[in-house]
Each structure stands twice: as structure tokens, then as C-alpha cells.
Image: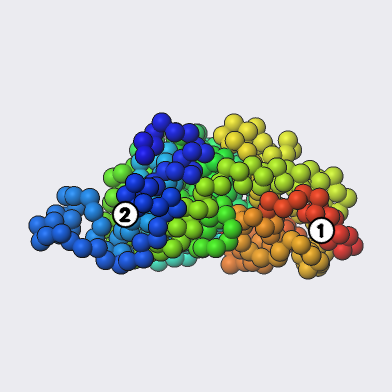
Amino acid sequence: MQEKKYKFDTLSVHAGEKVEKTGTIAPPIYQSVAYPYYSAEYAAKLFRYEIEGYMYGRMDNPTNAMFEERIAALEKGEKAIGTSSGMSAEFLTCIHLLEQGDNFVTAGKIYGGTNQLFSVTLPKMGFKPKFVYEPEKLENWENEIDDNTKFLYLETPSNPNLFIGDITRVAKLAHEHEIPLIVDNTVASPALQQPLNLGADIVVHSATKYLSGNSTCISGVIVGKSDFINGIREKEYRNIGPSISPFNSWLLLLGMETLSLRMEKHSKNALAIAEFLQEHSKIVSVNYPGLKSHPQHELAKKQMKGYSGLLSFVTKGELEDAKNVLNSFQLIIHTGHLGTTKTLATHPAFTTHQQLSQQEREEIGIPDTMIRMSVGIEDIEDLIEDLDQALTKIK
Ligand SMILES: Cc1ncc(COP(=O)(O)O)c(C=O)c1O
């Protein structure tokens, strides 16, 4: 398929497919860990990376390659590499770019697991994170950059605050210092935001979320320039083994076919819920980039095509009130996941961001009475009815 001439929705359905070669219109699952080396010379060349071909299932697989081609096409990147989870995508990206004694600068407003990777695991290897707690101010990033800084890291929209980082401006700053900008594009997905087109150099995803779309697989992906992705595949991916399974790539290929349609409905439902919550007497505040009251609404409007399905809100009353709301949902499911067809809600301070200290949570704006909601694609009237009855539990 000549991918370059097709538009986004066509690529979502077709990029990476090999219909003529496979003889099937649905992608096959190549459930094989090894591939024949056609001659000793072929094998030697393959292992010297002089020719293209499949080496061994830990490094490459034809179903994984279809998924990687498709997501690279959707993110407008040269190449992609599928990983076992979003966390392993982040980890591989970081350790590929860092040497002992190096540091990196990251927005403080990020997913709790990423915070722990940065603040607990990477420092054990001699890599230092520098957190920017007011990432909307570019000078705060600049002040942290020094000769040992190897990349800048942005998650936008962020989980669970829905902070919107200015990809173009942060990328420009990174390039002035000759370092790359990595963007976690999990919450927007390429249907709503294409960080590489906005100047970022590397995109990482928890493909577990919107790319798969219906909570069936833990997976991740890194997208970037060919040299960068090849470098990871030839070194850290091969040496550590965080490969994606062919079955999960297959689920992702199916999921991505409906990405735009789903993101449109997620965004529409989330805006309706955010507007409902904004007017509700039991709610202190609502974080949703689609609301005009959101501090970076104009920026979101500029760099995103829609505002996605994630929002968070702070309830009136005490911690018990927020817990009562979560315990009272009948349709909405109480769980820590996000980015799926079903509407889910969780309590970041006690689940996804529980490993952070109270002070760290306060610094990044996660009060105990915050509830995060990942709005699904159900009928909006049913969701609002459930939310409304649960909010009556607040005293
Ligand atoms: C924004 C973001 N990035 C990365 C991750 C990690 O992804 P995974 O659970 O696939 O490892 C998550 C998980 O919730 C997330 O929300």
C-alpha cells in the first residue's frame, strides 16, 4: 500500500496491511518465535542488519510489523516499535537516550506510574529526573536544562489533571539545546493530536488505552525517526526483551480501525459530562480541556482536533464524600484504567497516584477529593443519570 497518499481514516484501516501477500483481508496472527534463514549468508547479513528480514520473535514479528507500520503512519513518524506495555515504551526510550550521570527535564504533571519510573527506578541507574511543577511557564523548563540534559518529556493532556503542554514551544526549546522532545500521546491518540507534526521528536503511547480501545491488551509503542527506532530494536529491545505479543498487535490492528470514530464519540460524551458537572452544586471544579474555563483551552483548541474522553473533577465535602460517589455508581465502572469504550472512574490519590506522597500530589494538583473519569461511548443520557444519582451521596 502506498501509504503517503492516503488520509488518516484510510490509514487507520489499511496502513501496514499485506493483503496480497497474506491472502486475507483481516491481518493474520503470525504466532511464531522463529523464521527460516534461507542460507548461512542470509543469516549472517540479517544479524549484521544489512538486509531486512525477521530474526527472532523477541526482536521482530510480521504481525507486530503490521501494527508498527500502521501506528507510524497515523503518528506521521518514520518507524515504530511495539512494546509489552506503555511503561516499557517509556523505559526503553529513556535508557536509550541516557548514560550514567545524565539528567532529563519532565513536566511534573504526569501519570503516577511514569512519575515512579522517573523518580524511583531511573535514579537507581544513575539517571536524574528534573521535575517542572509549573510546566505552562517555559522559563521553568529552561532553568532546569544543563549540559547533561538529554531530553525533555511532556505528557499532554496529562493524567489526571488534563494539563495541556505547548508541544511546539517546548519542542523549540529542546531543539535550541540540541536535545529531543518526547511526548506521551496516550490521552489524545493520533486521531486528535499528532505531536511529531507539531515539532516533537519521539512519541510514546500506552497502547493499552485508546489505540486498542476496548480493554483487551496491555501494550505500548514508540514512534520516531528510523535511526532512533532501529537503535532501540538493535540494542535495548534485543537485550532486555520487552516485546509486544503478536496477538496484542493483532488486537491493536483491529482497534485502530475505529480510532477516529471512537475518539469523536469519547470527546462528545466527555464534553457533555464536563458541562453537566460544571453546573452541578456538589462540584468544586472540573478539569477538561474542552471547557472554556480550562486554563489552556485555547492551546488545546490549537493543537488538538478534539478534547478526548478523559476528565477529572473535585467534589465538595470530605474524602468520604468522594468515596461515596465512587461506591454508588451503577453503570460507571470503578477502576484505574482509561481510554476504553466503557465509562470508568477512579480516585487518583488512592489508586493511580497513590505511590506519590501527599505533598507531591498537592504540588501537581491532585486533591483527595478528585475523581478521574474516562468517558466511554455509551448513551450520554444513561451516563449523566448514573453520575447524577451518585453525586446525591455528597452531603
Ligand atoms: C498517560 C499514560 N502513560 C503511560 C501509561 C502506562 O501504560 P501501561 O499501563 O500500558 O504500561 C499510562 C497508564 O495508565 C498512562 O495513563
Measure how far apart labels 1 and 2 are at the Cα level: 46 Å
> In terms of depth relative to the viewer, which is nearer, 118 or 358?
118
The first of marks 1 and 2 along the sequence is 2
Q: Is residue 112 above or below residue 182?
A: below
Mark 2 neighbour density, 10 Å: few (under 14) some (14–19) many (20 or more): many
Q: Secondary structure at mark 2?
A: helix
Q: Is the residue 51 above or below the residue 73 in the image?
A: below
Q: Nearer the viewer, mark 1 or mark 2?
A: 1
Residue at horizontal 66 percent and vertical 47 percent from the top: 266
Which residue occupies 86% across, 59% down?
A: 389
Quarter holding residue 235:
bottom left
Percent x, y of residue 220: 46, 57
Amino acid on which disc 2 is placed: Ile
Which corner quadrant of the image does residue 234 belong to?
A: bottom left
Return the residue at label 1: 386
Quarter holding the C terminus?
A: bottom right
Residue 88 in sight: no
**Near-viewer residue (320 or 108):** 320
| One can see residue 217 in this view | yes
Residue that label 2 marks: 232
Tell whether 132 sits left or right of 245.
right
x, y percentage for residue 280?
Answer: 85, 49
Front residue of 31/279: it is 31
